[in-house]
Image: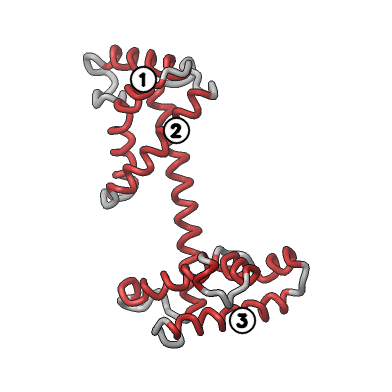
């Protein structure tokens, strides 16, 4: 395993590197921000490499963001006393946090993908169509603006905006009906009314009828 300074365990200097990291972790756990800054510098390259590999080597920006989130999580864990050096090396602990960050990213990406699919259904655009990303990106952005920015589409009420956003994020009509205290059939009626406003908005922007 990488010790965090680019030296695999077992090579000359690895034990010394582990001792240094252990000392930095202990100091950081006591609130020493300078020690954590050094620890961060030592761990960041390995965490970034981990996320570059996880993302197929195509998302350096994502790797940077997830590495930073992992380090923020590590800092919080150290301050909260959740790291026990007797149970794991600090590098192992940092990788465990990074794994959680990666899983959170995948779950969030899954929710975004589901929302994207529902947005495309809302506007009547087939997401699998050739050239979809290029041809419909602006249209999808317009839909998001309509749902996320109250002043963008004044005709759409806050309740309708909430209803469409919740549906796009995967809520079923039955679940929405329970939250609203109405029949599921009424949820669909309200959705269709809101859809009509969004489609009229898109027409005004020159997108046609979806």
Number of residues whose C-alpha sits closer than 10 Å to that of mark 1, classed few (under 14), some (14–19) or many (20 or more): few
- Name which of mark 1 and mark 3 comes first in the sequence: 1
Image quadrant in which you'd find residue 130: bottom left
- Name which of mark 2 and mark 3 comes first in the sequence: 2
Q: Is residue 96 above or below residue 162?
A: above
- Looking at the rendered image, the quarter that the C terminus falls into is bottom left
Quick one: 128 or 115, which is closer to the camera? Answer: 115
Circle 2: element type: helix
Q: Is residue 40 above or below residue 108?
A: above
Quick one: 94 or 152, which is closer to the camera? Answer: 152
Residue at numbered disc 1: 34
Residue at numbered disc 2: 96
Residue 192: mark in rendering: 3
Which residue is drawn at the image coordinates 29% and 21% (left, top)?
9
Cα–Cα span, label 1 and label 3: 57 Å
Q: Pinpoint residue 143: horizontal percent, then vertical percent.
A: 47, 72
Residue 59: mark in rendering: none
Viewer-nearest of discs 2 and 3: 3
Q: Is residue 41 above or below residue 23?
A: below
- Name which of mark 1 and mark 2 comes first in the sequence: 1
Which residue is drawn at the image coordinates 46% and 17% (left, top)?
85
Image quadrant in which you'd find residue 154: bottom right
Which residue is drawn at the image coordinates 56% and 81% (left, top)?
197
Number of residues whose C-alpha sits closer than 10 Å to that of mark 3, classed few (under 14), some (14–19) or many (20 or more): some
């Amino acid at each position: 395993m990488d010790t965090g300074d680019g030296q695999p365990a077992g090579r000359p200097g690895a034990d010394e590197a582990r001792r240094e990291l252990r000392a930095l972790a202990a100091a950081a756990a006591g609130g020493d921000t300078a020690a954590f800054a050094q620890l961060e510098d030592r761990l960041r390259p390995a965490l970034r490499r981990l996320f570059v590999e996880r993302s197929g080597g195509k998302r350096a920006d994502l790797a940077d963001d997830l590495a930073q989130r992992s380090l923020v999580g590590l800092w919080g864990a150290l301050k909260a006393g959740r790291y026990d050096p007797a149970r794991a090396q600090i590098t192992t602990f940092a990788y465990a946090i990074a794994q959680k960050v990666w899983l959170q990213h995948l779950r969030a990406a899954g929710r975004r993908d589901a929302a994207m699919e529902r947005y495309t259904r809302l506007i009547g655009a087939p997401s699998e169509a050739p050239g979809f990303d290029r041809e419909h990106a602006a249209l999808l952005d317009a839909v998001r603006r309509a749902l996320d920015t109250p002043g963008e589409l004044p005709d759409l009420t806050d309740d309708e905006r909430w209803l469409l956003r919740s549906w796009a994020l995967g809520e079923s009509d039955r679940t929405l009906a329970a939250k609203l205290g109405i029949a599921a059939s009424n949820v669909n009626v309200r959705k269709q009314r809101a859809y009509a406003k969004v489609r009229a908005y898109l027409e005004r922007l020159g997108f046609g009828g979806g």
